[in-house]
Image (tube, helix red, strand yellow):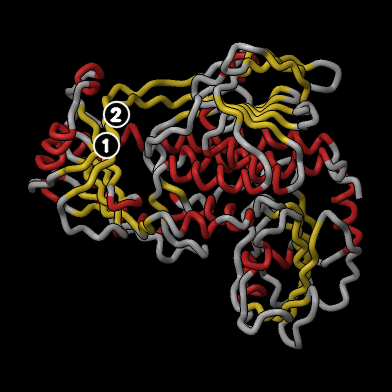
Amino acid sequence: MKNFAKVLIVGAGPVGLSAAVALSRAGIPIRIVDRLPARINQSRAAIIHARTLEDFQRLGIVDDFLATGVKVHGVVLYGSNNQILVRPSLDHIPSPYPYMLGIEQFKTEEILTARLEEAGVKVERGVELAEFKEDGGQVSTVLRMSDGTEDRCEFAYVLGSDGSHSTVRAGLGLHLEGTTIDQTWITVDVKIRWDRDPGEAVACMSEEGMVFIAAMNDGRWRVIVSHKQMTPEEAGKATVADVEKIMSERFGMSLPLYDPVWISPFGINTRMAPTMQVSRVFLAGDAAHVHSPIGGQGMNTGIQDSLNLAWKLTLVLKGVAKTELLDSYNSERHGNAKKLLKKIGVATKMASLRHPVAIEVRNHIIHLASHLGIQNVMPGFVSMLNVGYPDSPVVSESRTSWLSRGPRAGERAPNAAGLATAGGPEPTNLFELWSNDERHQVLAFGDDIPIPTSPLYKITRITKSGIPSDGVVVDTEGHAHEVYAAEKTRSLYLVRPDGIIAFRDGDASPAALAEYLAKWYVV
C-alpha cells in the first residue's frame, strides 16, 4: 500500500521534517521513517536564523515559529573583567526577520510534524532502514518495523537525514572526516534569576573558558560553558549547581539557575562526509557534516540542505527538470558545508584558546576589530544571508555590465518593500508575494517584455509607476529597482524556490532566459 512513495526520508528531526513538508506540499508522495519510537523532548538545537525563517516563509509556515520563539536581536561579547569586546546587532540586516529566533528543537519538530500531518503524511516511528541498494534506476530498501517484521519496497530517491551516526551514510561506505577539538563543553537549558533583556544574547570569553547564554521560549535560557580543566567524565557528572558556579565566577556576580529541563556534556567535532550524494541517495544535516555549536549554524544548515534538495527532487519527479539538476545538490551544499566548517572551526579554536597571553591577544584583536566595523560584518554571516552558490553549474547570467551593482546569479535574491499590488490596499514586499508558492519567480524590470508563461515559474512585472494589475506591481518607493540595479536598464531575474538567483540578464531577453531554461528544464 505504501510502495507508491517516490522518496524515502530516513530521520525525522528538523532536517528530515523540513524536506518532508516541502515535498509533500508540492504533491510528491513520500515516506518518512525514524528509528526512535517517539519525538525527542529535549531542546538541543535552539536557534533559527533569518535565512531559515525566510525559507519557512516561502513554505507558508513561518508564523507558527514566530508565535512560539523568542526574538534575539544581537549579542554582547565580554572579555575578562566584564569588558565589552563587541556588540553586534541584527536589527539592520536586510531581511524581514532581523533577529535570531530562540526556540527549543522539540518545538520546531512539533510544528513541522503538525504541518506534515496536514498534508496527510505521518512519521513512521520505530522503523529502521536495514538495507538499501540502487537497482535498475531505483533504490531497493528493507525497512525493519518495531515488531521485527520487514517491509521491502522501492523508491526513486532516498534522503539520509538521520544524524551523525547515520545508517544511510554507513550504508554508502562514507565516513565523517575531520578533527576533534580538545575541550569539554556543557549545555543546560534553565531559568535564570536575573534582569537581562531576552532580546540580546550574552557571551563571555575569559581565561577559564567560554560562556554563551541565549533566550528560548517558555522563559528559559540556553547556557553553554566550556571548561579547559574538566575531563569528559567529570562533565558527564556535572550538575546545574556546577554550571551556576562556573557562570558566576566568570561574570563576577551571582547568577542563580533553577528549573532545568536538560543538561548534557558534549565534545566538538569538525567533520564532514567526502560527498553528500551517491547517485540516487543523498545526505543532509548531521549525516553529512558536524561542527561546533558556535553561531548556531548546524540545524539551520541542515534545513537549508534539505530544502535545496526538495525543490530539485520535486521538479525532476514531476518531469519538469532534467535529472542532471540533482547533481547540483552536492556541488552547492557540500561546497557550502566545507566553507562553513572552515569558518566555524577557526572561531571555535579561537574561543578554546588556553594560554593567557594568547587569550589576551585574541580579546584585544576582537575589541580593536569592533572599532573597525566587525560588528557590521558578523550579522551577515550569523544570519546566513550571505550563503550562496556563485560557482554552481546551474546558475548563469548574461549581459550584466549594467547590473554590476545588482545581486549576482548564485546569490540570495534580496527582498524589496513598497510594492503596490492589484489585490492589496497596502504595499507589500517580494517575499510576501512569494509566500506559499513553490515555483520559480521571474522578475521583469521594463515594459513590454514578452515572457512566455510556464508552470515552472510565476512572472512578476515591476514598474516604476502606473496602476498595478494581475502580474504587475508598482515599485512605489523605487526599492526593488534599486536593490536589483534596474533604475536605468531593463533587466530580468529568475529566482529559484530556495531564494537563490538562478539566472539574470541585463537586457531582459526572453531568448536568453529560454536558452538557460532549456539546459536544465523541460519547458
Up-down relation of residue 412 to residue 229 (above or below) = below
Q: Residue at x 41, y 54 (%)?
A: 69
Secondary structure state at the residue bearing disc 2: strand
Farthest residue toward the front?
A: 147
56 relative position to 466: left or right: left
- Residue 362 versus residue 152: which sits nearer the camera? 152
Q: Amino acid at mark 2?
A: Ser
Callout 1 touching callout 2 (CB < 8 Å):
yes
Residue 101, image x, y percentages: 42, 53
Residue 153, image x, y percentages: 76, 20
- Residue 50 versus residue 257: which sits nearer the camera? 257
Residue 35, image x, y percentages: 54, 22
Q: Residue at x 19, y 46 (%)?
A: 79
Residue corresponding to mark 2: 264
Of labels 1 and 2, earlier in sequence is 1
Up-down relation of residue 351 to residue 95 (above or below) = above
Label disc, if present, on residue 188 of the rendered structure: 1
Secondary structure state at the residue bearing disc 1: strand
Q: Residue at x 53, y 50 (%)?
A: 52
Label disc, if present, on residue 206 of the rendered structure: none
Residue 480, image x, y percentages: 65, 73
Q: Amino acid at mark 1?
A: Val
